[in-house]
Amino acid sequence: MMGGVLSQRPDDLIIKPFAFYWKSFWQFPIRMMAMLIMEIMQACMLVLLPYAVKDIVTAADSHDPALGSVWNSIHDPFMTLVWLTIGMAVCSRISGTVLLFVARNIRRMPRIWLFEHLLKHSMEYFSNRHSGALGAKIHDVTHGMAMATWTLLFDFIGLLILFVASSVTVGSVYMPLGVMIFIWGMLYVILISLLTVPRIYWIERVSKERANITGRIIDSVANIFSLKAYAHANYEQSLLTGVMKQEESAVLRYGLWGEAIHWTHFILTFALITGSVYFAVETYEAGKIELATISYLFTLVLILSTNARHLTWSLQAFMEYVGQIRDGIHTIMREHEIADESDAKPLEMRKGEINFDRVSFGYSGQGGKSVIENLNLNVPSGQKLGLVGSSGAGKSTLVSLLLRFYETDTGNITIDGQDLSRITQDSLRENISVIPQDTSLFHRSLADNIRYGCLDATDEDIIDAAKKAHAHDFIKDLPKGYETMVGERGLKLSGGQRQRIAIARAILKNAPILILDEATSALDSESEQLIQDSLFELMKGKTVIAIAHRLSTIAKLDRLIVMEQGRIVEDGNHEALLKSKGHYAKLWDMQSGGFLGDETV
């Protein structure tokens, strides 16, 4: 698989929007069918109400005084009216009760599916997108799913049944009138649908721009220190304004199509009302229908025109929800860039030997330039290896490839002879502890952040790991101790405190392979010396790869390699590399001389 390639082809979708919606809609088929039947029955009863009123008027008009009170004549049609009204209420409440049991899951399951699929995307996928925008799209999809379902069940189905039932009941009284209403209903649905379809494109645009706005806001807030330090609030506001203008433009075009729909609705309902009145009066004068039938027809036409307006709004809302769903699905439900093979097996960790065999890799968007080029490297089991090199030499990329955050372009990487592409990603990462340079913590308690290294760890285990990472002292001095919330990305803590939490997390995980990526870069010299002792204790019996710009932090390791432009240019221990007087020796002289730092071994 080519590394760093993020495809945007439509057929990369793991599931199409309609299939995703259908899967969610039919999670509870019996309950959905129950609500559907109730809505159909309710629509049919609504059509029969004017018919019952017609029978009441006819009975009252033909009442024989010899029968006594007029109630005697209208009793049967009146009771029909009563039972229809009660039946509509019962159907509505049964549907509403079933909805209570469905509503809690109609959002829950799609949200779980989306979140689960999202987390399996590659690091490159996330690096190319705003995290806030992705969160907004999950919300948009799940909200759109729920609202589209309610609109479909409680608006579309009922209104379509209303049109059909109206045509049938009117046709049973006078066929030409029934045909007229049926043709009008078909014309209405077709025209409104044709005008609504273009709105899907624009609502997708609106959804994308709104997600961009959310992402832009979150990006600014997440980097609030830089924003304030550089006094660039106005600049960030100008960037947000630019995105908002694009959203406003899309909203305008979306709204213009809406106005076309409203005008079409007005013209068609005006034609229905005036045409029905004219047709009914002409038919009555011809003696083909009774006066009571005219009242029935007028009542039904008013019901149709009122519900047609509601259908217009519902159809537009439905298309808006469809647009949100489509946009979110196209963004999230893509094929995973890095996926386990169907026959992938868990990693069998035996010794912890790592081997890079002719590995090359380049990030997408860099014009095909290789960051790692034809690299060969063997790290024997238990060896402590230090990576040295200038920024951009490929050190962190090498670690990312080992963690399989990216796929190699060529070559392969093995652990104990097992190709990483043939083992499951979870089992690989379960056997590797990472202490990163940029430690980002969850907005949870300190205890939960440390426990992330081993989810079933006890409180005693957490405290012990914190002590070894020299984090216990500052934690116990906090008002809430280990239950202190660290803020978004851990910003309530200093850089050094965050790094100690990351070290405690790695100590708790105790994986056989340990990766240190500038693990002590945020610590002062005194704290670093204390942590170094803990790290060397942690390294015992493990295969270690450590990256450091301060050479004093890795000089005691078993082996050091120097990387430049994705290649290994020097390989040996500290003493051997100093004697060779190459790149490493120059870096050491610069640092020991105070140019890049004054640390010494």
Image (spheres, rainbow, N blue to C red):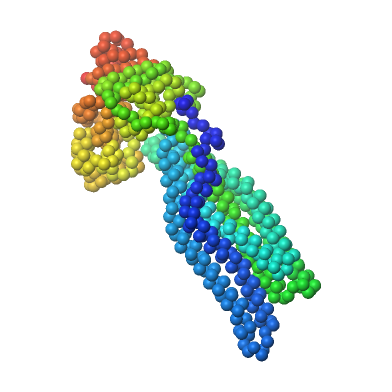
Residue depicted at 44% across the width and 47% down the height: 111
The location of residue 557, given as percent across then percent down, is 25, 20
Image position of 564 (left or right of 35): left
Residue depicted at 40% across the width and 22% down the height: 412
The location of residue 91, given as percent across then percent down, is 52, 66
Could you say which is closer to the camera, residue 316 or residue 427?
427
Q: Is residue 27 visible?
A: yes
Image vertical order of residue 151 relative to residue 290, above or below = above
Q: Could you say which quadrant of the image residue 173 lies in?
A: bottom right
The location of residue 437, given as percent across then percent down, is 32, 30
Q: Could you say which quadrant of the image residue 516 lies in?
A: top left
Q: Is residue 598 visible?
A: no
Q: Which quarter of the image is occupied by the C terminus? A: top left
Residue depicted at 78% across the width and 74% down the height: 287
Image vertical order of residue 484 relative to residue 168, above or below = above
The location of residue 166, given as percent across then percent down, is 65, 65
Image position of 24 (left or right of 597): right
Number of callouts in the render?
0
Could you say which is closer to the camera, residue 580 or residue 423?
423
